Amino acid sequence: MSTKLLVPLLLGSGREGRKSEVVGRYVHGQMLAAGLDSPFVDVRDYVTGVTFHSRQLQPTMRPWRDLMARADGLMIVTPEYNHGYPGELKILLDSVLAEYERKPVGICGVSAGRVGGARAVEQVRDVMMALQMIPLPTAPIFPGVSKFDPAEYDDKIKPLIDEMLWLGRILKEARVTAAE
């Protein structure tokens, strides 16, 4: 069994002018530096703006399904808009089901204000548990994103990545063993 984990980073906003992308790129860079195999996934590449049942997989969602079927976990960077998370993130998350099961998920919140996306993180955490993913306990928030300074976050993102590596390996081994 390969010890390298495949953990995509999902940027959860398709909004023009989104500030969360700078945080997403930073987190992605930290994941790569830690040795994770981590494609950068932009919600814009998948979501058409229309909600479909997961059993009615749309052609644009097939690559997402295939990626999550191979993935060992997921990292989400989501902004908080009006006390919630973006609708396009919900549409993409709801597009598949079984592909998420028994995999860890890290969630980072971003906002222009002082709360840093904490409310969005809590809402996404509930959704991910309903999708049978295992949310990691560490959930960094990035307030005041317009003044984002990566140097202030290195010590906050490292525990999240360490948790992903640890739990991701354990769950990957368990999934492989269960499939044998």
Image (tube, rainbow, N blue to C red):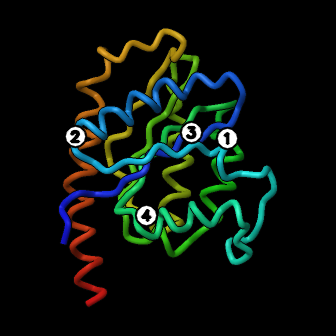
What crowding class fits label 3: few (fewer than 14 Cα within 10 Å), some (14-19), or many (20 or more)?
A: many
Quarter of the image with the C terminus in it: bottom left
- Element at badge 4? loop
10 to 105, vertically: above or below? above
Q: Which amino acid does label 3 sit on?
A: Ala
In the image, which is nearer the foreground, mark 1 or mark 2? 2
- Element at badge 3? helix
Quadrant in the rendering for residue 102: bottom left
What crowding class fits label 1: few (fewer than 14 Cα within 10 Å), some (14-19), or many (20 or more)?
A: some
Residue at x-position 27% and y-position 69%: 172
- The answer to which of marks 3 and 4 sits earlier in the sequence is 3
Q: Mark 4 points at which residue?
A: 133
- The answer to which of marks 1 and 3 sits earlier in the sequence is 1
- Element at badge 2? loop
Q: What x and y, as percent, mark residue 24?
A: 47, 32
**Numbered circle sitting on residue 34:** 2
Left or right of 61, for residue 126: left
Q: What residue type is labelled 2?
A: Ala
Q: What x and y, as percent, mark residue 152?
A: 31, 15
Q: Which of 49 and 132 is in front in this view?
A: 49
Q: What x and y, as percent, mark residue 3?
A: 18, 61
How far separated are the C-alphas under marks 3 and 4? 17 Å
178 to 123, vertically: above or below? below
What crowding class fits label 2: few (fewer than 14 Cα within 10 Å), some (14-19), or many (20 or more)?
A: few
Q: Name the residue under label 1.
A: 86
- The answer to which of marks 1 and 4 sits earlier in the sequence is 1
Q: Name the residue under label 3.
A: 120
Q: Which amino acid does label 4 sit on?
A: Met
